Image (cartoon, rainbow, N blue to C red):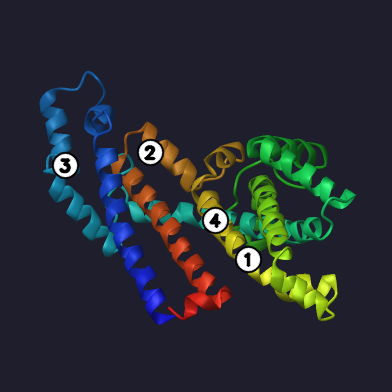
Amino acid sequence: MLRYALQRFLSLILSLAVSSLVIFLVIEVAPGDPASYMLGINAQPETVAALRAELGLDVPKIERYFAWVGGMLTGDFGLSYTYRTPVAEMIADRLWVSLPLAIYALALSTLIAFPAGVYAASRRGRTGDIAVIGATQLGVAVPNFWFAMMLVLVFAINLRWFSAGGFPGWDAGFFGAMKALTLPAISLALPQAAILTRVMRSSLLDILGEDFLRTARAKGLTERQALWSHALRNALIPVLTIIGLQFSFLLAGGIIIEQVFFLPGLGRLVFQSITQRDLIVVESVVMLLVFSVILVNFLVDLAYAAVDPRLRSR
């Protein structure tokens, strides 16, 4: 188990190093100069050159790359070109919106998908299974922003149970903040729950046809006992993979939902920074999101070892 964990950790470090280089090169070769954008098209070349020197854009790219990476390792993400404030503070403020939203949505998705997938697999070909499959097809086909608009129309405008948008901040209290995140979380969770339900059902159906389950039933176990005691645990590996990918998507891919509900999250920060050519913010946020993806995959690999005894012997 320890050797397996060390191998996965070394893979994490290598992935982060390669990702940081790719992110820096891709963003740096993007057209447009931040200094020219900030000063406008009528700015004098001397003024643009002075601003480039102030922003550190006149330094060779290789030096800027190592300065950027070294700063991130110490928690210093640099200064925003546009707002002239530390990028780390900007990210921290937005992360306290995006991270709880992603966790909330993932929890809702999992709570919906697990019982729905088990229910559909245990009633294969019956009315319940067909109903679940139909609901998941609808969930996959309909985009999450449509769910968001329908939820706003029903629960915010007609019933007035929730606000239509905005975030009061955590100073307003835990329940007040979570209430503001409820509709966005449901909007994000429903399509992901549909995907996870289908994966759960498919994985369980594959396991239910295995020889060891037929043996367990032959020894006297009921279908319910065989399902919950043996099949479910063996079906979790592909499900854990999807859960890990979903968390990364929910953390990084909520930009449309954040726009619909006017949430000051990371997705909205990236969108604003791209339009303003604030490269240092874009690089840092994207690197943080890549780190979250790689870290979640690392934790999922460790979860594999906890579920599958064969990995613990490596």
Q: Mark 3 vs mark 2: which is more N-terminal?
A: 3
Residue 250 location (% of width, % of height): 55, 50
Tag 3: amino acid = Glu
Q: Measure the alpha-carbon separation of dots 2 and 1.
A: 39 Å
Q: Measure the alpha-carbon separation of dots 1 and 3.
A: 53 Å
Q: Quadrant of residue 107?
A: bottom right
Closer to viewer: mark 3 or mark 4: 4
Dots 3 and 2: beta carbons under 8 Å?
no
Q: Measure the alpha-carbon separation of dots 4 and 1.
A: 16 Å
Q: Which residue is mark 2?
A: 273
Q: Mark 4 vs mark 2: which is more N-terminal?
A: 4
Closer to viewer: mark 2 or mark 1: 1
Q: Quadrant of residue 170?
A: bottom right
136 with respect to 66 (left or right)? right
Which mark, by number, is residue 247?
Answer: 4
SS under mark 1: helix
Tag 1: amino acid = Leu
145 with respect to 282 (left or right)? right
Instruction: State the quadrant of the N terminus.
Output: bottom left
Q: Residues within 10 Å of mark 2 (few under 14, many from 20)?
A: many
Q: Measure the alpha-carbon separation of dots 4 and 2.
A: 23 Å
Q: Mark 3 vs mark 4: which is more N-terminal?
A: 3
Which mark, by number, is residue 54?
Answer: 3
Dots 4 and 2: beta carbons under 8 Å?
no
Q: Which residue is mark 1?
A: 236
Tag 2: amino acid = Ser
- Residue drawn at (61%, 44%), measured in percent from left and top? 166
SS under mark 4: helix
- Residue drawn at (40%, 81%), measured in percent from left and top? 2
Residue 40 location (% of width, % of height): 26, 23
SS under mark 2: helix
